[in-house]
Image: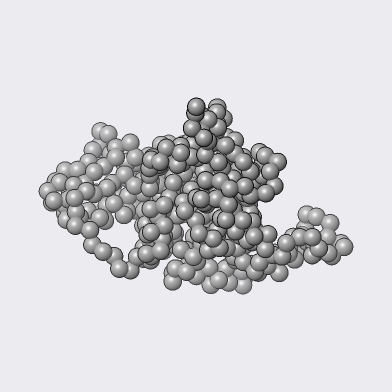
Amino acid sequence: MAEVLIKKEACRGCQICVEVCPTEVLAFDEAEQKAVVKNATDCIACLSCTYICPSTAISQQDFHSVKNFYRDLDFSVKAKRYL
Amino acid sequence: MSEPKIKLNTEWLSVCGGCHVALVDLHEKIVDVMKVIEIQRSPLLTDEKGYPPAQIGLITGSVRTDHDREVAKAMRASCDKIIAFGTCAVYGGIPGAALAHTAEDILDRVYLNNPSTDSSKGVVPNRLVPKMDAKITPLDEVIDVDLYLPGCPPHAAFIFDALMSLTKDRDPRAKEESICAKCNRLMKKTDVSQIKSVMDGMPDEDTCFLSQGYICLGSVTLNRCAAPCPQNGVVCTGCAGPMPQILTEPNRDIRTEVAARMSALTNIPPMDVVNEIEKSAKSYYAYAMASGMVRNKPTFLIEKWIEQVEKV
């Protein structure tokens, strides 16, 4: 099962992840003005929230990674060598 | 007896020199660095003009002249590990924005038809200066590069972490996070329906620029600076280069990613944002347009965008 992690200090409270999630995994905490994980078990690991998050606050763990054959492979190798 | 120090060479190519100044910005931390690293050759710091063998080589700047190319090769031959240091070395940087013009146009503007200098003699320097290439080339298209540290310049904290991780053979702590992750402005939904220029009005200090209708590249830019601009009232111009997801995924781009977020926060239609960025593409894509990772994207149509703006 995919695990959704939200870095609280990075979340800017835009709520775009809450809107984009097709399975309503995420919710918005009005008091803290931050996104929170509400229904963790419903996550289908589509990664929509991870990609749209402006502040890279969301990450997924333990999901089946699909090989994106269309990716820029040269840069994917290079990206591992960033300091 | 203490362990021998790690030897470091640095060199600059076509660049403003700010990355070398950033090295000195380590302030007192440079004392810790100097305990384990010996700077052998550095244009700003030492008198050494040759290329003595070294373990680490920092190269700043992109390749624009014959001289740049020869110097880059000499550094590669003398250093075990080459680090492309700063946005110019990694992506081409601001000099790379010259991709939008021919070399002849640039020489003409600088030496023959420059409104702010005396160009009455009509001379373009051609003696004792290296030949200028037709275009800018990022460093790794000329020599093999081992590591990359983008930033314009990289913040001293990232430089210190990078150098220490190399000397201690550990992974650097720097992450793949965007500028927004370090910006304190709150992103909230607004009714703004028009894009504003940075000259329009006074932006609210606590609200995200995107929510207010100002185009800010924070969400598409890698954090190697600790976000000083947006936290001091200036929109992010993307100086550390695009996020890896933009560079690796052909269907993602600076303009579409900003448009998706901005239209979700405001009432501005996404295509308005896309059109606005295309209209000023020379500014919004300035830092990374020379890099093959952006230049070769099928969706990157800089010539068409420039023509659309400048033909009128």
B271 and B257: which one is in front? Answer: B257
Q: How many marks?
A: 0
Q: Position of residue B128 (x, y in %)?
A: 79, 60
Q: Residue B108, located in which quarter of the rendered image?
A: bottom right
The residue at the far left in this view is: A41
Q: Position of residue B145 (x, y in %)?
A: 49, 56
Q: Quadrant of the C terminus of chain B?
A: bottom right
B207 and B91: which one is in front? Answer: B91
Residue at 64%, 43% (x, y): give it.
B42
The residue at the far front in this view is: B1
Q: Is residue A40 left or right of residue B14?
A: left
Q: Residue A71, located in which quarter of the rendered image?
A: bottom left
Residue at 55%, 50% (x, y): give it.
B79
B161 and B18: which one is in front? Answer: B161
Q: Position of residue A31 (x, y in %)?
A: 25, 33
Residue at 79%, 65% (x, y): give it.
B126
Q: Is residue A12 positioned above or below B262 on the image?
A: above
* Any part of residue A61 in sight: yes
* Any part of residue B97 in sight: no
Q: Position of residue B149 (x, y in %)?
A: 48, 48
The residue at the far right in this view is: B121
Residue at 23%, 62% (x, y): give it.
A66
Q: Residue B299, located in which quarter of the rendered image?
A: bottom left
Q: How is the image coloured?
A: one colour
Q: Is residue B279 positioned above or below B221 on the image?
A: below
B7 and B2: which one is in front? Answer: B2
